[in-house]
Every structure is written in C-alpha cells, then in structure tokens.
Image (spheres, rainbow, N blue to C red):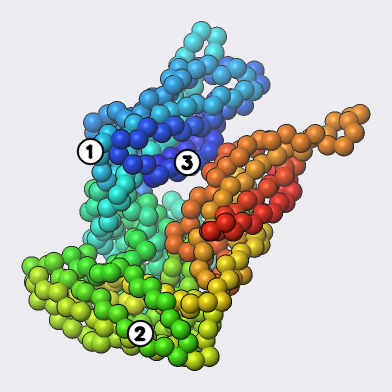
Amino acid sequence: MVYLILSNLIFAQIAVSPLSIEQTLSPGIRRQFEFVVYNESRTDSAPLVIYPTDIIQTSNGSYQIVDVGKGVGSCAEWIVIKDSMITLAPNSAKAITGHIQIPRASKGGRYGAIVIGPRPEAGAAQVMVKLSVILKFIIKPVSRPNALITEIKFEDTEELKNLRLTGALKDAIAISAFVKNEGDIHLNTEGILILRNPKGTKIREVPLGRGQGVILPNSTVGIRSVIARPQPGEYIAEAIIKYDSRSRLKARMPFQITSRKVSAQGDMNASLPLAVSINPDNIALNVSPNAFRSRAVILHNKETSRVRVSAEIKQVTNDESGELIIWENPTPSRWSCAEWLELEPKDLVLPAGAKKPVKISVKVPADNNQGERYSQIVFSVQKDTFLPSEIFLPVTIKYQGLIKEEIEIADIKIVHANPLALGIFVQNTGNVKTKPTGKIIVERKKTAPGMLGENIVQVGEYRLRPIKDYVLPEQTVCLYPDMPTRLEKGRYNIKVEIDYGKGHFASGQKEIKI
C-alpha cells in the first residue's frame, strides 16, 4: 500500500490536493501517483521546487522532514518526480506526477516525504514555508505488525494550559499511553481509555487520543486523552490498543487524584507481544440445519518459556470502517453463532515450543437454514505476571443454500468540509457478509445566462478505498473515495458504482453542493 498524506498547510496561497493516496504494491513494480498543486493568488506567480526526502516521527505523532539517509526506512531513492521545478501562474493549478519503483528484494514498510518548497525568481512572491507529502509504503506480502505499550503518563491541569481548555474541561487531566512500533511496517492503531476504581469496576470509557493513529517503525508515540478531572481518590487507568484486526494490547497503571495533583501510584502492568500462533487463523464451515461439526485449531508457543492460554467465545459486528469488532451487547444478535459453539479445553498451559489443539464444536439449531452466522474466539495469552495479550479467531458458519447477497447505497454525503471528504454509506441488506468495492464519478453542473438547461462536465473518476474486513448483514460501512480534497464552489453530481462480488453491482447518485 502506498499512503500519501498531503499536509493542509497553505503558504503564499499555495495548496495541494488530495490529502491522501493509497495503492497496493508488490516488489519489482513501478507505479504512478499524482497530486495537484494550486496557486490561489490572483496577482502573484509561485516558483516552486519539488523533491523527495526522508522523515522521522516525534513522540506527539507529528512528522519531521530530515535529510536523505537519516529517516525511518527511507524510500526517497525510489521516487522520481516528473516536474521537479515549476512556476504556477496566478489563480492556476498543476497536476504533479510521481513514479515509485519498488526494488525486487524489498519488504516491510518504507517511508519518506515529497517537499514542495520555494524557488525564488525575480519579480515573484517569496514563499517562506514548505508543504510536504508524507509517503508510506507497505510491500506485499504484508508482514505482521508488532507493538508494545511502554508507559502511561499523567498530566495535571497546570500542564495543559497551552490547550486553552474551557467548559467541562477547564479543570481537566490528561492520560497518555506511549506505544512503540517494534515491527517493520507502520501501525494503524485504535485505542480506548478505561477508568476503574481500585476493585476494577469500570467508571468511565473514552477514546484514547482521537481513537485512531499512525505510528512509524522504530517510533514511540504518546496517544493522549484529555478528560474532566475525576473526584479525588484512587483509580486505575487501563489503556487498550488495537494495532491490527487480530490482536490488541493492554496496560494498567494505578493513580491518585487529590485537590492539587494527579500522580501515578506503583508500577505499570502491560501485556507483551508474544510469539504464539494459531493455525488456521480463521474458521469457515458449511453446515446444514440440525448438524453437528467440529474443527481443531493448533496453538503454537514459539516463546522460550511457558504461557497460559484461556479462550472465550464472543459475538462480533463491524464498525463503520468495516473492521470486525467484539459486540458487547448481552442480547444475542440474529447473526451470531456464539451460542452454538463449545471449546475444549478453554484453559491450557503451553510449554516453550509446544503445540496443542483446541477443539471447536458446532451444534446448529434445526430452525436456522439461511445465510451466515458469525462470532470471534478470543484467546488470552499470558506470560508470567504480565497482563494477557489477546488474539482473535473469526468464525463463520454458512448454510448450504438460501444465500442472499445484497447491498444498498444508503447515503452519499459530505462528512468533512475542509479538507473535503465524501462518504459513501453502504448497508448490507442480504444475509451474508460482503466486501464492497467500487468507484465514484464526479460531475460539475454549470449554468450560464442565456444557456438552456445545464452543462454537465465530468471532473473525474475515483476509486473507493477498500474496507478493512467485511460488512455483516444489517450493518453499514462508510467508503471513502481517493479524490481531490478541494473542489470549486458549485453543484455536483456524485455517481456511485459498487461491486460486491460475483457479478453483483449496485449504483446510485446524489447532488451535493460545495
């Protein structure tokens, strides 16, 4: 995957679009990418130089431009920019084409930036600030990510003055979990923060940071949440970090709130990324009503010491990004098979280097005969006194007949105005999971004095980014197109074409106003 994020800075009325470009790449491939540089000044031209370089990531998650050879997993030498020196006339734009050549022996992640900086010429405006395009590559086959929570840190109200908090957060504290990326590809993290009392009872749950974040290899980033100050007393802060669809980390730190300060009490206890594998890494069974089936999975402890494993069956749903997540609702879902499953054993000890089976038995009710059912088995793997790490095993039960694959385009709307982001909301109205893909066509509607009707001009055709896992029956996902993040004010037709497998298509359109 190539992931280009163009910063939203504007200098001398210069801007860039889109903010992100994603592509999937293999070793040895050459691929083109494109972004647009705008000069929005009505009077001044803008001479610019465009070149690739390296980046590093700071502890607050921001990127810093550094010289080639000093960054994280450099890709600068793989990038060629067609137009490295340009001059933009007033009120004009230019599409910049770059090419990426991936060496055949490459693997893991490679990172860098494209800098758009000043090239002063006589009589032209002096551009003093630089824009940058952050480059992220993941090369197939994709290696598994690896992460570790290294610290939980507390900040009191006085330390947050620079945030100028008001209202309920005027008297606030901040709690940060520092996550280290120990793998060779960047992490896409999702985090939550749970406050507990000393007995472990949950008091409050909030997103950690903005809920999601990116961490480059060999980087440690603090993911911070600012919350209203709790009442004086003793608490436990629990950070949960999910860094791929199959595993997550936990860390707990006791702390104390007084009228004057917030402070850690004791040591942090955290889970470790453990070398324990499950084979196969998903279960899919074709069944008939009133049937009994069983399947074994093999747990392999690749650690040098023993680990304890416990297994639990959970209901599952998907979030708006299409990622499968645990469904904590105690009411059984219509599409759940969790109550049909039994595990044997549920608890076991794996000596160093050992392999042991876990038997999964499925008893299908007689009155169920259509579609699919879903669940996840959560394996908690614990070493010594550390908190357990969790590994997820998705389970799909599919009936032999009466399969209905169907989706509908529920809505097309602007989800963010500046930078512009369109959301295509797709609902699964069938009875099996789907993984929709597709594209949008953007058309500009123009009218002029004396013109009969409207003039329709196609702006472009843009692919929809793939979702993480699936959209389950009766659930909805939001698909985002790789399109410009800046459009002129006016009326636009957004035409959507969705492919959801085996010759199944859906389409829709909607007019939006910018």
**Residue at left 11%, top 74%?**
354
The CA distance from mark 2 to mark 1 is 44 Å
Q: Is residue 105 left or right of residue 479?
A: left
Secondary structure at badge 2 equals: strand
Q: Give 115 or 444, whichever is nearer the viewer.
A: 444
Residue 41: give its label: none
Q: Give 225 or 377, whichever is nearer the viewer.
A: 377
Observer able to see residue 270: no
Q: Amino acid at mark 2?
A: Arg
Secondary structure at badge 3 equals: strand
Q: Residues within 10 Å of mark 2 (few under 14, many from 20)?
A: some
Q: Is residue 290 above or below residue 68?
A: below
**Residue at left 55%, top 62%?**
477
Q: Residue furthest top?
A: 122
**Residue at left 24%, top 33%?**
70
Residue 105: give its label: 1
**Residue at left 19%, top 68%?**
276
Q: Give 262 or 467, whichever is nearer the viewer.
A: 467
Residue on which disc 3 sits? 21
